[in-house]
Amino acid sequence: MGDRAGYLDKLRQIAMNGYEHYKPAFDKLNDAYLLVLEPELLQYLKDKNKSRNYIPKLNSKAKRIYDGLTETYFNNEKFAKLEPYINSTGDVIDKWQEALDHYCEQINLYKVFAPIFLKAPFTPSSIVKVYWQGSGARIDEIDIGEIFFDPNAKDLDDIRYIVHRIYLTPEDAKELLNEGVYKTDTPEIFDGKKPYERFELFEIYELKKKKWHVSTLFENNILRDAVELKDGQPFVFGYMLPQVKGKTDENYICAYGEPVLASMLPLQEELNVTRNSVTDVVRNQVMPKTIMPKSANVSRDEIHKVGTPIFTDAPADVTIIPPGDIGGAMAALQTIENEMSEVSGVSPQQNGAPTTRKETATMASIMANEGSVRLQGYIRTYNETFFEPIFERLAFLVWKYGDPIFFAGFNRGEVPSFSVNLNTGIGALNKEVQKQSLMDASGVIGAQFGMCLQLGDGDGAARMKEANEKILLELLPLYGIKNPNEFIGKEGRLIDQQYAGADIPAAMGGTVSQAGAIGSM
């Protein structure tokens, strides 16, 4: 192996060693989502004929956060909106936005981001590769186990190299050789591979003199060496929760965040043990264990057979082993459940569990709101570290390579400055809370409307009507109605025509229900 190949391989080893330090923790979280018990524990439980269920609490809370993320990011007409900044003007930005929307539609953002959202609660970082290929932009998800970062970097801006493991078939490699992307004096290195067999290569991205370069390493062969990337390095990586470095942690990797459900893992393991113990106790109650002398000559089949007598010469010697205490175990389960809700920010009610008798609807609403606040914190960090960089890079590529038809009349020499606005709204976890709040407000306004009618206060009633129409504009989209103006516009005009210049008769008053307050106006 030459000096340069040895140097690149050394970078690869250092970066992969940094990942290996974290890998056991990453794998445990992934197994928790997939409901996989540790092999040693599973075998032990099998051997002892004990219950071995994996209780899907972490799994269900991850899916609830996934629902919140998909609702938050895809419940809007545009995922990302470009806005003028410093030296850009509205007309340029409008054209640019049109082009960006076109290429985003080609990419199918939901198809790309939905799997990322599902894994985000239990993975340390979300990673994508954003690049231009042929006549369009691409966003590819990169698995956390296939990319390795500079372990000596102090923060994201300090990362000097990135190693990406890729897999190619012999045909893929030969095609890249023919296109001149790869070069080698020994093209036979790909011979002997089976058709469609994937073999691994490593792409090493290095920052030199503020410019990124890429090299490709296959075994001890350099297929390309320090090729300058005119569009910079293509990877974007971000997280919902930053990682806190330990005082004595010498293996800290700044590209990783803390999985939002990581602190829930010990509770999940405790829950598995406790719940399975309860199951075993119930089984023992249904089929209690008995102790009897060997001289009793009672067969196992006789003991297990239901409804038939067992005959023995010494019935006093037969003893039943008492089952464990279920009450104490159930109390422990409730404690674990509460702690899981606290550390995850997702309450049982948000996961679809019914509200208990002692828990009022108001308390359930407060708990849901607290979960929403937690999710909004995750989303804010996610936007700053992941989505804004994605769309900044995507917009840059669209400006540089997008079809000229979108930019007719504009010089695309210098890239104008811009900012990215992500319309993430309130998020799904807060959706029900906001619905309830708006309907409560509607009920109050409805009562005031009725009072104004009784008092013959036409101006006051008109103001209440206007206030309720504003509430409708906010409420109807939460029920999936995208054009609320069409619903209240016609109704509003009818009311205006009916009461224009006239006092509203008191006879039109009446009781206004919470849900129907708006419709009664």
Image (cartoon, grey):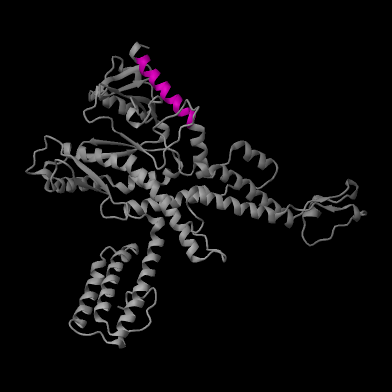
Which residue is at a point 52% across and 66% down the rendered structure image? 360
The quarter of the picture where residue 244 lies is top left
In the displayed structure, 15 sits above or below 481; it is: above
In the displayed structure, 493 sits above or below 5; it is: below
Any magenta on residue 499?
A: no
Which residue is at a point 54% across and 64% down the rendered structure image? 359
Total residue callouts: 0
401 vs 510, nearest the viewer? 510
| Residue 141 visible within the image | yes
The residue lying furthest to the left in this view is 409
The N terminus - image quarter = top left
In the displayed structure, 479 sits above or below 316; it is: below
Any magenta on residue 21?
A: yes
Main SS of the magenta part reads helix
391 vs 372, nearest the viewer? 372
Q: In the rendering, at what x and y percent does residue 60 appear?
A: 49, 51
Q: In the rendering, at what x and y percent does residue 469 appear?
A: 27, 70
Q: In the rendering, at what x and y percent does residue 286 appear?
A: 73, 57
| Residue 56 visible within the image | no
The residue lying furthest to the top in this view is 2
Magenta highlight range = 5-22
In the displayed structure, 120 sits above or below 148; it is: below
Q: In the rendering, at what x and y percent does residue 154 appear?
A: 38, 28
The residue lying furthest to the right in this view is 313
Which residue is at a point 69% across and 51% down the rendered structure image? 280
Q: Is residue 264 left or right of residue 111?
A: right
The C terminus - image quarter = bottom left
